[in-house]
C-alpha cells in the first residue's frame, strides 16, 4: 500500500513524536524518500515546532508591571513583599 | 509559608518569577494585551491571597498553569467572543487524489542553536494570534508551554486524541502562515 501526500500530512504529528506503528512509519519514510514536496512539508512542520519552542516570554509592559505591583502590595502579603 | 520545590514562595518571588509566565500564557491564549493584563492581575491576587494555605510545593507551577488557563477561558466566556466564519483547514490544500495542490517550497535552513530575532518573534506571535481559539489554546499549551497532551486534555476538558487533532491542525496552520512569510522574503 502506498501513502498519498495527504495521508503523510495527516500522520506527521505521530511521526515527529515517534508514536507511529512500525509498518506505517516505514511506509511514510518510503514516501518521504521519493516525494520532494512531502520531504519539504515534513521539514517545515518540524521547523514550525522548533521555532515555537524557541519563543521566549516577553517581560511585562512597564506600566502594567508598576500597576500590578501596586495592586499586589495592597493584597495580603504586605506592602514590603513585592520589592521596589 | 508555601514552597515551590526550590525555595520559599514569597509574594515578591511570585511577582518576579511567575508574573511574566502568567502574562505571556494569557496573552497568547487571548490574543490581546488588555485581557491578558486583567487575567494576570486576577490570577496573581488570587495566588498571593492563598500563598499561606498553598501546600502544592513542587506542583506550584502546574497549579498556576491551571489557574491561569481557567481564568483566561473565563475571561473569554465573559466577553462572549465567537469564531468568525468557517475555519480554513490546511488539509484542504490537497487535491482529491491526495497530492499537494500547490508548490511546496523550502524555508531557509534554521541554525542548530536557534535564537529568534525580533522580526521572527513578532511573526510567530502574530501567527499564534491568528489561530482560531479552539486551536490556539491547545497550540499555546502544547508547543509554547510544552505541557503534556494528557494534562492539556484535563485542563480543557478534551480527550487526548482531540488534543492531538487540534494541535496537528494548529501546527499545519502555523506552518502555512510561516511559509507565506518565508516565501515573501525569498522572492
Image: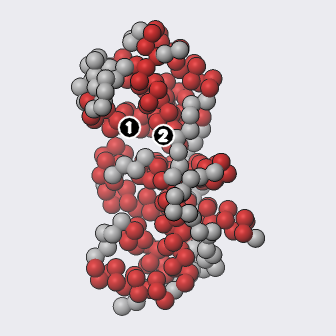
Specify the label residue A76 is tagged with.
none
Compared to residue B151, the image places residue B177 above or below, namely below
Compared to residue B177, the image places residue B64 above or below, namely above
Q: Position of residue B18 (x, y in %)?
A: 43, 31
Specify the label residue B65 is tagged with.
1
Q: Do the residues labelled 1 and 2 touch (CB within 8 Å)?
A: yes
Q: Can residue B175 be seen in this view?
A: no
Question: Of all residues shown, which one is farthest toward the right?
Answer: B187
Q: What element carries label 2?
A: helix
Compared to residue B87, the image places residue B13 above or below, namely above
Q: Which residue is drawn at 43% across and 78% down?
A: A7
Q: Is residue A45 visible?
A: yes
Q: Which chain carries label 1?
A: B
Q: Which residue is drawn at 52% across and 18% down?
A: A69
Question: Of all residues shown, which one is farthest toward the front?
Answer: B113
Q: Residue at x 47, y 29 (%)?
A: B19
Residue under pointer 2: B25
Label located before the other in sequence (1 or 2): 2
Q: In which quarter of the image is residue B87?
A: bottom right
Q: Which of B35 and A51 is in front in this view?
A: A51
Q: How far apart are marks 1 and 2 (CA)?
A: 8 Å
Q: Residue at x 44, y 30 (%)?
A: B17
Amino acid at each position: 500500500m502506498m501513502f498519498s501526500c495527504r495521508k503523510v500530512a495527516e500522520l506527521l504529528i505521530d511521526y515527529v513524536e515517534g508514536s507511529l506503528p512500525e509498518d506505517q512509519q516505514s511506509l511514510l519514510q518510503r514516501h518521504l524518500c521519493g516525494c520532494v514536496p512531502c520531504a519539504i512539508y515534513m521539514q517545515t512542520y518540524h521547523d514550525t515546532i522548533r521555532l515555537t519552542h524557541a519563543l521566549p516570554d516577553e517581560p511585562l509592559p512597564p506600566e502594567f508591571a508598576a500597576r500590578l505591583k501596586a495592586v499586589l502590595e495592597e493584597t495580603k502579603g504586605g506592602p514590603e513583599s513585592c520589592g521596589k | 509559608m508555601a514552597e515551590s520545590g526550590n525555595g520559599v514562595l514569597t509574594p515578591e518571588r511570585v511577582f518576579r518569577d511567575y508574573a511574566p509566565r502568567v502574562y505571556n500564557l494569557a496573552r497568547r491564549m487571548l490574543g490581546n494585551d488588555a485581557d491578558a493584563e486583567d487575567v494576570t492581575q486576577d490570577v496573581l491576587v488570587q495566588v498571593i491571597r492563598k500563598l499561606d494555605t498553598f501546600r502544592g510545593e513542587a506542583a506550584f507551577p502546574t497549579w498556576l498553569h491551571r489557574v491561569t488557563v481557567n481564568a483566561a477561558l473565563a475571561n473569554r466566556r465573559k466577553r462572549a467572543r465567537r469564531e468568525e466564519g468557517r475555519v480554513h483547514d490546511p488539509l484542504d490544500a490537497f487535491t482529491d487524489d491526495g497530492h499537494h495542490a500547490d508548490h511546496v517550497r523550502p524555508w531557509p535552513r534554521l541554525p542548530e542553536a536557534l535564537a529568534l530575532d525580533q522580526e521572527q518573534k513578532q511573526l510567530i506571535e502574530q501567527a499564534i494570534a491568528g489561530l482560531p481559539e479552539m486551536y490556539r489554546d491547545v497550540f499555546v499549551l502544547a508547543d509554547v508551554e510544552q505541557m503534556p497532551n494528557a494534562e492539556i486534555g484535563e485542563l480543557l476538558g478534551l480527550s487526548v486524541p482531540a488534543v492531538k487533532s487540534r494541535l496537528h491542525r494548529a501546527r499545519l496552520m502555523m506552518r502555512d502562515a510561516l511559509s507565506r512569510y518565508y516565501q515573501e522574503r525569498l522572492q
